[in-house]
Image (spheres, rainbow, N blue to C red):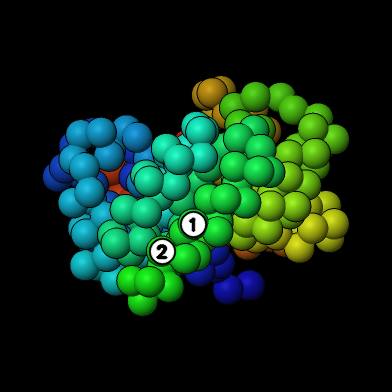
Amino acid sequence: MPKPWNKLIVALDLTSQKKIKEVIKTLSPKVKKFKVGLIAYTRFGPKIINWAKEAGADVFLDFKLYDIPNTMIETAKTFIESGVWAFTVHLKAGQEALESLKGALTKEARLRKKRRPLIIGVTELTSQKASLNKVLQLAEVARKSKIDGVVCSVWEAKQIKEKFGLCTITPGIRAKKEGDDQKRIATVKDALKNRVDYFVVGRPIIKEKDYLKAANQILAV
Ligand code: C5P
């Protein structure tokens, strides 16, 4: 079976500029999407977005915005200018806030003749136990507010796709039980069986010496 490189998003959760650049350089011939979160962004700022884009990859900005509408809108407007592929918001922000965020970003993107980044709502963190029902309730907020997709675990992805047709992005990917902070974990094979659109892998790749070998290995399990 061909390896699903096109579904892999590698999380650049690193504090060394040298390592971040190495990961991008080593993996970008095959990996087309990198996730930038607070660990790296608070140290290096918007230039990380350019490091990934210069390597021909898309950026998934994971700040999990959760604030009043005006703060989320004004923050997210800068993502249009920096050309990120997608960014996360927290679904607990609610339907009204998310609808106004999408409306404001669509308008701004049109005005600037740029692409609107995808808005991806975070359901429950994969580091916590959560009932399917709770995750589906949050995913329904995403559908009602007509944003583009959700972050969930592999174990909710199929139902979310069937019920709401949203794009699903799933962290918590492990080849085996690692004993770390992730709780709702799954393998890449589980992810494919559950029809996820993308899966996020951080530490199982970026903490290894040979990033390409580690990525190859996790994609095979
Ligand atoms: O290292 P690991 O593979 O656990 O990385 C998973 C990444 O996905 C981390 O950057 C984490 O912040 C992020 N994430 C998550 N669970 C969510 C949303 C984002 O693990 N629900």
Residue at 21%, 67% (x, y): give it.
54
Task: Name the kind of residue labelled 2 in the image.
Answer: Glu
Which residue position is annotated with label 2?
A: 108
Where, by quadrant of the figure, is residue 138 drawn? top right
Q: Position of residue 139 (x, y in %)?
A: 73, 45
Task: Please tell me the numbered disc located at residue 208.
Answer: none
Which residue position is annotated with label 1?
A: 104
Q: Position of residue 218 (x, y in %)?
A: 52, 51
48, 182: nearer the viewer = 48
* In the image: residue 17, left or right of residue 108: left
Residue at 79%, 58% (x, y): give it.
164
135, 89: nearer the viewer = 89
Where, by quadrant of the figure, is residue 202 drawn? top left
Q: Residue furthest left?
A: 18
Quadrant of the snapshot with the N terminus:
bottom right
18, 53: nearer the viewer = 53
Q: Secondary structure at mark 2?
A: helix
